[in-house]
Amino acid sequence: MYYPAPLYLTPFIMTGMVAIITAVLRGLNRALQSSPRPQTDGPENDWPEKDWPEKDLSEKDRAKAFWSLSLLLMAWFVVATLTSLVGFYQPPSGSAPTIQYGLVIPIVLGVLLFRAWPLLRRTLAVIPNSWLVGVQLYRALGAIFLILYAGGHLPALFALPAGIGDVLVGILAPVAATAYARSPQGARLRVWLWNLLGITDLVVAVTMGFLTSPSPLQAAAFDRPSVLIGMFPLSLIPVFGVPLSILLHLASLRKLRADQSAAARTRGIQQVGPSGHRVTA
């Protein structure tokens, strides 16, 4: 099904994607340069010993991590763009949807890469959780769904929860990040709830996208289906922006778990006196 996209959509989406990639790579570079090794004096950058074979990230390791992740991110974006341009996410009428491949495969590959690549785990160890949260300010770009709804290009059942949810998560990202940077212990629950909100928003948006798009799964919005979500350039959001956000959420939650373990170890050490006896208050 062909649907004419508004003229402003391509420049808006492509500019937004470039901004997202730039923000992620600049933030990664700054984190690697300013935090060459995990700190042991606080939970914000602590990480279980088993997750990296060497505590220090050498200059060579930092450069390798940055350029490797940069190439992976840009290659992913190129593949997402090309598959969108050739109409891979626009199956023939009556056929099963294909956009789930662009959504799920990057997430699975990202998780497998994390498990198999020690340098990636060590890189994540030195990146502050506050950055993993704050960088998702870009989620506010989801306002495009509300703009498209207002113009009659997307159904309310999809556009409203997707747009409002994204804007809310994006606005709250720097708030949660700042709170965590100031007090990791005090803001841990806030960051956990923010991650839960962010993941829920994505799950709801993806579900509504499937239910309102032309396919055998469509269950609503037959008068105004979500045709644009499978077309370039809007398809870049579910096949690049959404899986990237999911991976950032997973990384943040893993950091939270590591921080909690580090805090527990710290409390255990503090409760033991110099003679090895437990100190009681």
Image: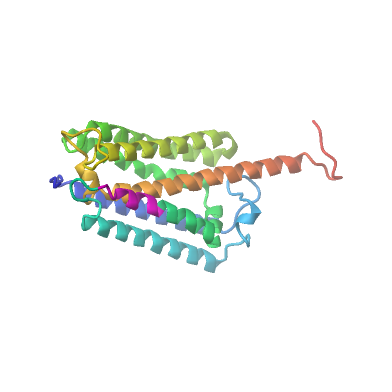
In the rendering, at what x and y percent does residue 187 appear? 54, 35
Q: Predominant secondary structure in magenta?
A: helix
Does the magenta segment cover residue 47?
no
In the figure, residue 81 lies in which quadrant? bottom left
Front-most of residues 171 and 53: 53
Q: Is 229 drawn above or below residue 167 in the view shown? A: below
Q: Is 65 drawn above or below residue 255 in the view shown? A: below
Residue found at x 42% / y 46%: 246
Residue found at x 32% / y 50%: 239
In the rendering, at what x and y percent does residue 63 appear? 49, 66
Q: Let me know if residue 234 appears in the view.
A: no
Counting labels gives: 0
Residue found at x 30% / y 36%: 208
Residue at the outermost right position:
275
Front-most of residues 248 and 230: 230
In the rendering, at what x and y percent does residue 261 appear? 64, 43
133 lies left or right of 140? right
Stretch of the chain drawn in magenta: 96-106
Q: Is 183 drawn above or below residue 107 in the view shown? A: above
In the rendering, at what x and y percent does residue 243 appear? 38, 49
Q: Let me know if residue 52 appears in the view.
A: yes
Front-most of residues 97 and 127: 97
Residue found at x 49% / y 63%: 65
Does the magenta segment cover residue 105?
yes
The color scheme shown is rainbow
55 lies left or right of 212? right
Image quadrant in which the C terminus is located: top right
